Amino acid sequence: MSSTSSVITTVTATYGGSITAEELAAKIVEPASARDADVYALSFFSDVWLKQLDFIDEMKVDLVAAILVAREFRKLAGWEMQLGKLPLDQIVKDRYRLKYLPVEPEHVDHYRDFLGRSVQEQDAILKTLDGPEYELFQSFQVAQALYEAPEQRADGSITPEKIASNPKRYGW
């Protein structure tokens, strides 16, 4: 049984009815699902957490959008959704190749057109801007220039020096 059919079986077993994988994929990225307390989306976020990432990958669902909806469901349900615990900041930084986030991670998608362009195209856009808008878009450009892909980063192993400099982060 594929991950997708397993997820659909789990989601429909709780509430009955039927839903296609495509319908479920649309529901888990739609903020209205949380506002409307959609039972299928709630079941996905709370009942199938072991297969959530497989389903998201297989159905080509926007992971960032799904994390944001899971976080909205947490507010509604009163308990933590596993998907909502994922490190949104780092996921967004890696998606758009940003060293830092000039805005809150949930707002970065509003700038995806700019972030997806070449440096030359970004420079052309910057020439048309001024004031705070110019500064914001320039900060995106700087954040991209400073970014290092995870596979290119220096050794990320935990050293005694890292633990000593930040004991709370490493739980010591």
Image: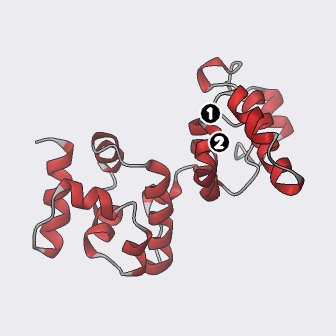
Quadrant of residue 99 in the image? top right
User: If the image is split into quadrants, where does the N terminus sit?
Assistant: top left
In the figure, 106 relative to 129: above or below? Answer: below
The type of residue carrying mark 2 is Phe
The picture places residue 38, in percent across and down from the top left corner, at 31, 76
Q: Is residue 93 visible?
A: no
Q: Which residue is mark 2?
A: 114
In the figure, 112 relative to 47: above or below? Answer: above
Disc number placed over residue 117 in the picture, else none: 1
Query: How many numbered discs?
Result: 2
The picture places residue 133, in percent across and down from the top left corner, at 81, 54
Q: Residue at x 69, y 19 (%)?
A: 155
In the figure, 38 relative to 54: above or below? Answer: below
Q: Is residue 80 visible?
A: yes
Disc number placed over residue 130 in the picture, else none: none
Q: Secondary structure at mark 2?
A: helix
Tell me the CA gap for discs 2 and 1: 6 Å
